Amino acid sequence: MTPGNFQQLANFIWSVADLLRGPYRQPQYERVMLPLTVLRRFDEVLAPTKETVLKRYETLKDKDPQLVDRILNELAKDDDGKPLGFHNHSQLDFRKLKGDPDYIGRHLMDYIRGFSENIQKIFDRFEFEKEIEKLEEANRLYQVIAQFAEIDLHPRRVDNITMGLLFEDLIRRFNEAANETAGDHFTPREVIRLMVNLLLEPDTKVLTQKGVIVTICDPACGTGGMLAESQNWIRAHNEHATVKVYGQDYNPRSYAVAASDLLIKGHRDSRIEYGNTLTNDQFDGMRFDYLLANPPFGVDWKGEKKEIDDWPDFRGYRGKLPRVNDGALLFLLHMISKYQPWQKDHRDKPGSRVAIVFNGSPLFTGGAGSGESEIRRWIICHDWLEAIVALPEQMFYNTGIGTFVWVLSNRKEKHRRGKIQLIDARDLWTPMKRSLGNKRRFLDEAAIDDITRAHGALTDSKNSKVFDNADFGYRRVTILRPLRLRFQITQEAKDRYLDTCPDLLDAVLAIEEALGNEPYYDWNKLWMEIQKIVKALPGDVDGWAPGAKGTAQKKLFRDVFTVVDSQAAPVIIKQHKMVPLEIEALFPGQTLPDLKHDELHALLGLKPDGKRKHIEYEPDPALKDYENIPLKEDIVSYVLREVRPYVGDAWIDRETLDEQDGGIGKVGYEVNFNREFFQYQPPRSLNDIDSDLEEVERRITSLLREVTE
């Protein structure tokens, strides 16, 4: 059978699944069909050397099982005489299983237990013994086994390449039938093809060389679709290439499917491992040429947090980690730790490329200084981010949200260095004839080719834009505005104050007598007047004396008798001798606009009063705001252009300039696709809207007339 006509065999196996109708729902068919397909293939592959293995097993069966496995795994060979790396020492096979229907369940379990340890580990993850019991109770087990015994999967008829395509096709069918859960362990094939293109196309010249050896890793491999598609791409371009694939997954059944797929294809040098990638790296210390993954969207890492927090770093990254409710970026950090070191023209340091699928959250979640922003900053400042592709919505089986493919590399081509390409493919979708869960759209081959070409061209166009790394960085600066208070003694305010400070009745009455009940709009002058009134009273006024208690009483007095009023004068918090600021030290490395010294001071909250003094105003907490200022712009020019024309009394908080990063504020990084690709659409004219409304009214009137006449 050639790779092109495996479909007939896949259809037959799919039809056998109809025997499961009743005990199983359609999305559950894969629990039986995939393990049995694996078993039948192994049964055929092991047949030529089965007798040799059985004879040798009789001499070894009382020895250490690990020793037995090593010896028998070498004795079990394929048609070319190469060791298979697994064996079965049971006397049974599918032909004998079919010949004894009365004990089919017990014999099938004995047959599986006769496999080598590496195969038994896979079937333990399949939890296949439970399915055997379920099928036997429903009287379906013998029928299914009898059908599988008729399927010829011998390597002489179905080679490893064709068998791999067959198994991939079955995985796809069963996962798509599952609809609501497929996205947990299966990425749509066209998305994988796009990712593989973006990952491998730039290296076509290298990958088509004779004798090339390639290593590929997927740390969240699911059923192994990305690894399979990567192998298919390389095989299509270079049939002599040696491809070693490595995968890890935490879902037992997905791991079992992916591990089976490798064995079916005869990949002895490749590995699929079971375990939690974030806390139990099964490929510790290994580096790979290519890495790709579709980690879970928005899955928290609470269960791993305690262990990870005890580590000195996370896979070599020593910065802040993302918030606990979304661990997607942790997978990217893990993949970056698997980079091959890069050195130009050095064969042993070829560098690596990465492709990963994210939802929108890793692009922009978290402000400057947050874990997400710091990770983006670390990646971009190392010049690893090559491109991001925005995919259409409704592309995945278990979610309709927008998704993005990130492409990274530590060996960017020369013309890409210092650049990041954004590709907007959100409109390049084709509707599906039948929805599969949330998946209602797909990328056809033409769309995949268009995106791949746009990536390779690295030019600006309608759907592609090229930016400098610094374009995505910004400084987060705090903007303050003065507090403005209006003072007025009202009966309500007086009652509130005296309820708390009844001993200050005389002071309040004296203030009221002197000032009346009119509003005052300059708290600074008024407070001086109030102090004079209180000092003029006979004896000491308790609560106005120096000390913590007095300060608290005065604060309460202002809070009760004042309200914020934009028409009032700003409240002065401090007035001191004019001290020249080292402006250049506050804005190191920035070219400042040509402003007078006093204007720069005022922009920092220090207003000259004309008497060689500086006035500082008290900031209003409610008016505190933040500006994200692009790294390419100087802070002063930005504030003068974007802030001062709209709020003329605003100033830059000097404390935020001293927070970090060379004394010029917190630095953050984010990628905002909507901002970069937004196209303004003017609203329709009122005349057009009125015309449409009139047409609707005419139609409604006509319909009503038909009903009433």
Image (spheres, rainbow, N blue to C red):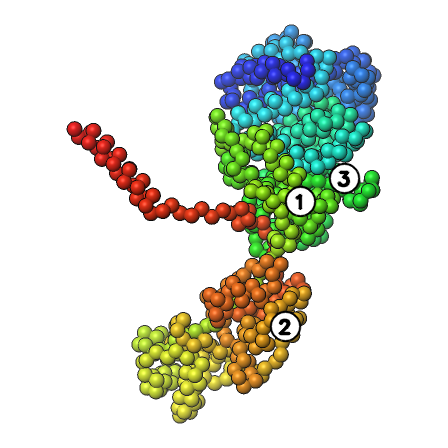
SS category of the residue bearing label 3: loop
The reply, left or right, for residue 153 in relation to residue 17 is right
Which residue is outermost to the left? Answer: 709
State the residue at coordinates (81%, 20%).
82
What's the mark number on residue 386? 1
In primary-sequence order, the first of circles 2 and 3 is 3
> Which amino acid type corresponds to the residue marked 1 in the rendered image?
Glu
In the rendered view, tell whether residue 233 sits above or below residue 536: above
**Figure disc tally:** 3
How far, Cα to Cα, is label 2 from label 3? 50 Å
Write down the residue under mark 3: 286
> Which amino acid type corresponds to the residue marked 2 in the rendered image?
Ile
In the rendered view, tell whether residue 133 sits above or below residue 216: above
In primary-sequence order, the first of circles 1 and 2 is 1
SS category of the residue bearing label 1: strand
Location of the N terminus by quadrant is top right
In primary-sequence order, the first of circles 3 and 1 is 3
Q: Position of residue 48 (x, y in %)?
A: 77, 12
Asked where in the image residue 114 lies, by quadrant, the reply is top right
State the residue at coordinates (60%, 32%).
448
How far, Cα to Cα, is label 3 from label 1? 23 Å
Label 3 vs label 1, nearer the camera: 1
Write down the residue under mark 2: 583
> Which amino acid type corresponds to the residue marked 3 in the rendered image?
Met
In the rendered view, tell whether residue 375 sits above or below residue 458: below
Q: Position of residue 600 (x, y in %)?
A: 58, 73
Q: Position of residue 699 (x, y in %)?
A: 26, 34
CB under 8 Å between discs 3 and 1: no
